[in-house]
Amino acid sequence: MKLSIVDTHAHLDMAPFDKDRAEVISSAKNAGVSTIITVGTDLESSRKAIGIAENYSGVLATVGFHPHEAARLKRETIVKLAEVANHPRVVAIGEIGLDFYRNRAPRTLQLQALKWQLELAAEINLPVIIHSRQAKKDMLTLLHDWTSSYKQQSGQPRGVIHCFSDDVETAQRYLDMGFFISFGAYIGYPSSGHLNNVIRSIPPDRLVIETDSPFLPPQSYRGKRNEPTYLPLTATVLAEIRQVSLETIAKDTTQNAYHLFRRPEYQQKKAES
Ligand SMILES: [Zn+2]
């Protein structure tokens, strides 16, 4: 079987890809990664992401300010983000969130930046890509307020919790709010055994996969640059943990990714199956 999977989170705009971006994208395609979502982390990075998505048919972009960059996000910048988000290759607002582990921006500014960008996503009706590190309590409260104040068309995904590494109860609360859960290569690290329960608890129609390239490479490439080409390794680990076939993981996560990002492929595949 020819694999066809979607990398729902990569940073192709970043400097480690400057020398060989075209090769990285074509190598991923050959490895069965049919679509790559390249994720913006500030205004400049979001513009670069759109540029890449314009140049490569298998790449789509998202726009947003990462929590590390939150201190640089001003009210006026939201207007500019809204402008770039209007581009036809843009499929989500992200990545946005809270990182109380690294705390590269003051917490109050992270919270403000997240609120503004959640409002923007609601206004222009796009799903969100959420980064949450050691910020579970605030994140659950904020997203609960957001999902209850902004009504969504029924069955339409709210967004995705990227690089999920929390427990079953927390996952359940995000699922209840309409979010998808995304896992990366870190699920195969020797220290990640505690995640097996949560990985098994996610319903098959809410699961997506990602590389977070150039970060978090698979175990066999640790210390090196990660790239979308390695995504099949994560799909394989996920299949082992969930005790289903690789084909099942590929089919489900691909369909879910198209659903999450509201792509026409979702309706097509639904009609086929
Ligand atoms: Zn990221």
Image (tube, rainbow, N blue to C red):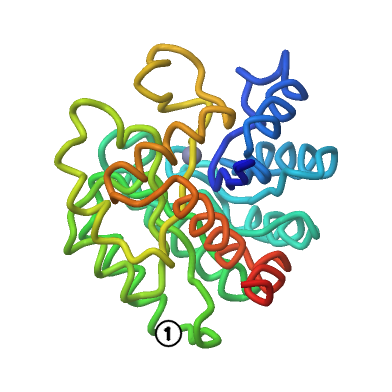
Nearer-the-camera pick, 99 or 51: 51
Nearer-the-camera pick, 19 or 25: 25
Nearer-the-camera pick, 94 or 82: 94
Q: Quadrant of residue 198?
A: bottom left
Name the amino acid, label 1: Ser
Q: Residue at x 14, y 41 (%)?
A: 194
Disc 1 residue crowd, few under 14, some 14–19, many 20+, Cα 10 Å: few
Screen quadrant of the N terminus: top right
* x, y percent for residue 259: 58, 67
Screen quadrant of the C terminus: bottom right
Q: Quadrant of residue 216?
A: top left
In the rendered view, tell whether residue 43 sits above or below residue 168: above
* x, y percent for residue 74: 57, 52
In the rendered view, tell whether residue 33 sits above or below residue 147: above
Instruction: Write down the residue under mark 1.
Output: 149
Q: Quadrant of residue 85?
A: bottom right
Secondary element at tag 1: helix
In the rendered view, tell whether residue 97 sits above or below residue 150: above
Q: Is residue 194 left or right of residue 114?
A: left
Q: Is residue 19 left or right of residue 109?
A: right
Q: Is residue 215 left or right of residue 139?
A: right
Q: Residue at x 35, y 77 (%)?
A: 145
Considering every residue shown, the one lying at the far front of the view is: 1
Q: Residue at x 41, y 67 (%)?
A: 179
* x, y percent for residue 19: 72, 13
* x, y percent for residue 23: 74, 20
Q: How many marks?
A: 1
In the rendered view, tell whether residue 122 sits above or below residue 72: below
Nearer-the-camera pick, 254 or 212: 254
Residue at mark 1: C-beta within 8 A of ligand 1: no
Q: Residue at x 61, y 68 (%)?
A: 126
